[in-house]
C-alpha cells in the first residue's frame, strides 16, 4: 500500500493558526510603538508650551506667588499676563466657537431627523385615511423643522380631504414660499382654491404647474375643466339695443344668441309646430307688424329653446359595438362624448368593456367628468340590475395618478361612492378586501 505524503487537514489548520498568531503579535507591537510615539510627542508639545509661558513671565520680572485668597481679585500682574497671552486667549475663543457650532449643528440635525420621522408617520396615517392623526403628526414635524416644504404641503393635502380649504391654501402658501418650484404645491393650492371658488387664482396655479411640468396631465385636465365650466363665452348677446342700431336688418328676422347655461331659459320647453307660409300671406304680414324691438329678445329665447328641443330630443345615437382588442383611450372618449347625454345608451356601451381592461384603457389618465359619469352609471344601472361593481371600482383604483384624481372629487362624487360601498357591504365580499378598497378611495363608511 502506498502512503500519501500530503499533510493532514489538522496540521494545515494548526499551521494557519500559528501564522495568524504571528501576524497579530506583529500588529500589536506596531500599535504599541505608535502609542508610545504619540505620548512622547504630546509630552514634548506640552513642555514647549510651558517653556514659552515661563519665558514670557521672565520678561515681566520674577514675582513671588502666594496662595490665592477666596473671592479676591487677581493681581495686576496676573491680569496683565492673562490678557497679554495671545495663545491662551486664541485657544479659548476657538474652542468656545467650535463647541457652540458643533452643539447647534447637532441639535439642528436631531430636530430635522425627528421632523422627518413625524412626516413619515403622517404619511402612513394619510394613506390609511386617518386625517386627524396625520394632521397632528405634520404639525409636530413643522414645529421641529419649519423650513421643510414637504411637511406643510402634505398637511395641506390632509386639509383638502377634510374640506378645510382655507387651511390648505395657507399651508400651500408656506410650502411655495419655501420652494417656489414645487409643482405639487401649486396643484394642491389649485384644488383648495377650487373648493373656495377662487377659480381665477386656481387657474393661475395650474398654469404655474404647466410651466414647471409641461406634460402634467392632471393640471391640463383641471385647467380644461375650469375653462369649460367657469369661463363665460365672449360671443355677443342679442339685445334690444342691437336691433335698434341695426337699421339694415329685417325686423322679422330673429337672430340666435349664445348665453351661458345659468342664464338660459329655465321654464319647461314645448315643441312648436312650424308651418310654411307664403310671402303674401296675411299671417306673415301680421307677424311683421307685431314684431317690435321690445319683444325681440323674447322671440330669440323661444327660437333658442326650439333649437335645444330639436337637438336634445332628436334621433338618438346608436351604441357602437366594442372590439376589446383594438379599443383605445381616444376611441373611448370619442364614444363617451357622443353618448354621455343618453345614460341608458352609455350603460349599454360600458357593459361591453370588462373591468380588467380599465388600467390599460386609462393608462395615461382619467378625466374627472368621465369618472363621475362612470360612478353614476354604476349606481343607477348596475346596482338595480344586481350587477357586481366591486371589480370595476377595484380596477379604477389601479389607474395611474389615481391619488391626484381623488383630490378633485366633488361632494356628489363622494355621495355616489358612499352609496356604492354601502351596497357592497351587503354582499358576500371579504371584509378585508372591501376595507382596503374603501381606504384606496379614502372614504369613511
Image (spheres, helix red, strand yellow):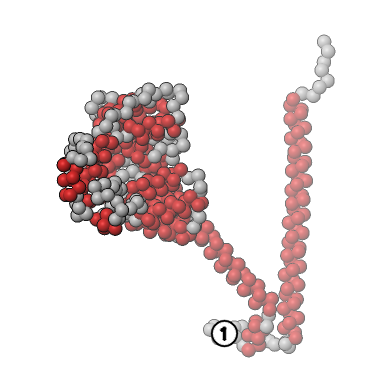
Quadrant containing the N terminus in the rendered view: top right
Along the line of sight, the residue nearer the viewer: 321 or 137: 321
Residue 241: x %, y % from top left: 26, 58
Horizontal and vertical percent position of residue 382: 27, 27
Q: Which of the 4 quarters of the picture holds residue 390? A: top left
Specify the quadrant of the image occupied by residue 395: top left
Judge left or right: residue 53 versus residue 426: right
Residue depicted at 36% across the width and 46% down the height: 228
Q: Residue at x 46, y 56 (%)?
A: 149
Left or right of 144 in this view: 336: left
Report x, y in % for residue 179. 49, 57
- Neighbours of disc 1 within 10 Å: few (<14), some (14-19), many (20+): few
Residue drawn at (50%, 52%) of the image: 211
Q: Nearer the viewer, residue 72 or 190?
A: 190
In this rendering, the answer to whether 78 lies above or below 234 is: below
Residue under the point 51% across and 60% down: 108
Left-right relation of 19 to 188: right
Q: Which residue is mark 1?
A: 69
Count all numbered tags in the image, as a single digit: 1
Residue at far top of view: 1
Q: Nearer the viewer, residue 82 or 250?
A: 250
Image coordinates of residue 420 in percent, x first then y, are 27, 33
Quadrant of the snapshot with the C terminus: top left
| Camera-side residue of 171 and 430 | 171
Amino acid at each position: 500500500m502506498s502512503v500519501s505524503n500530503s499533510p493532514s487537514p489538522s496540521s494545515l489548520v494548526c499551521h494557519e493558526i500559528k501564522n495568524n498568531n504571528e501576524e497579530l503579535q506583529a500588529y500589536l507591537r506596531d500599535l504599541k510603538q505608535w502609542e508610545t510615539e504619540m505620548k512622547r510627542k504630546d509630552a514634548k508639545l506640552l513642555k514647549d508650551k510651558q517653556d514659552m509661558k515661563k519665558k514670557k513671565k521672565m520678561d515681566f520680572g520674577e514675582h513671588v506667588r502666594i496662595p490665592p485668597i477666596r473671592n479676591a481679585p487677581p493681581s495686576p500682574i496676573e491680569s496683565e499676563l492673562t490678557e497679554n497671552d495671545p495663545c491662551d486667549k486664541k485657544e479659548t475663543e476657538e474652542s468656545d466657537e467650535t463647541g457652540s457650532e458643533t452643539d447647534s449643528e447637532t441639535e439642528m440635525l436631531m430636530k430635522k431627523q425627528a421632523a422627518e420621522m413625524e412626516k413619515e408617520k403622517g404619511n402612513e396615517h394619510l394613506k390609511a385615511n386617518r386625517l386627524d392623526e396625520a394632521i397632528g403628526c405634520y404639525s409636530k414635524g413643522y414645529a421641529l423643522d419649519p423650513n421643510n416644504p414637504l411637511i406643510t404641503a402634505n398637511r395641506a393635502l390632509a386639509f383638502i380631504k377634510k374640506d378645510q380649504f382655507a387651511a390648505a391654501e395657507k399651508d400651500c402658501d408656506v410650502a411655495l414660499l419655501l420652494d417656489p418650484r414645487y409643482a405639487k404645491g401649486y396643484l394642491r393650492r389649485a384644488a383648495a382654491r377650487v373648493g373656495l371658488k377662487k377659480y381665477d387664482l386656481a387657474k393661475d396655479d395650474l398654469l404655474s404647474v404647466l410651466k414647471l411640468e409641461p406634460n402634467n396631465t392632471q393640471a391640463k385636465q383641471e385647467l380644461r375643466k375650469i375653462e369649460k365650466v367657469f369661463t363665460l363665452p365672449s360671443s355677443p348677446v342679442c339685445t334690444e339695443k342691437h336691433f335698434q342700431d341695426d337699421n339694415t336688418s329685417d325686423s322679422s328676422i330673429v337672430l340666435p344668441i349664445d348665453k351661458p347655461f345659468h342664464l338660459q331659459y329655465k321654464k319647461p320647453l314645448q315643441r312648436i309646430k312650424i308651418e310654411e307660409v307664403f310671402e303674401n300671406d296675411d299671417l306673415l304680414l301680421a307677424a311683421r307688424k307685431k314684431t317690435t324691438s321690445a319683444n325681440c329678445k323674447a322671440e330669440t329665447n323661444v327660437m333658442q329653446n326650439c333649437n335645444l328641443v330639436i337637438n336634445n330630443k332628436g334621433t338618438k345615437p346608436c351604441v357602437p359595438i366594442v372590439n376589446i382588442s383594438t379599443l383605445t383611450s381616444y376611441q373611448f372618449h370619442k364614444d363617451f362624448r357622443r353618448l354621455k347625454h343618453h345614460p341608458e345608451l352609455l350603460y349599454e356601451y360600458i357593459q361591453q368593456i370588462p373591468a380588467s381592461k380599465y388600467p390599460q384603457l386609462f393608462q395615461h389618465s382619467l378625466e374627472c367628468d368621465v369618472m363621475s359619469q362612470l360612478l353614476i352609471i354604476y349606481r343607477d344601472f348596475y346596482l338595480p340590475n344586481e350587477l357586481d361593481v366591486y371589480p370595476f371600482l377595484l380596477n379604477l383604483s389601479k389607474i395611474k395618478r389615481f391619488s391626484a384624481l381623488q383630490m378633485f372629487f366633488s361632494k356628489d362624487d363622494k355621495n355616489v361612492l358612499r352609496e356604492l360601498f354601502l351596497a357592497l357591504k351587503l354582499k358576500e365580499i371579504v371584509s378585508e378586501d372591501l376595507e382596503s378598497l374603501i381606504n384606496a378611495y379614502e372614504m369613511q363608511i
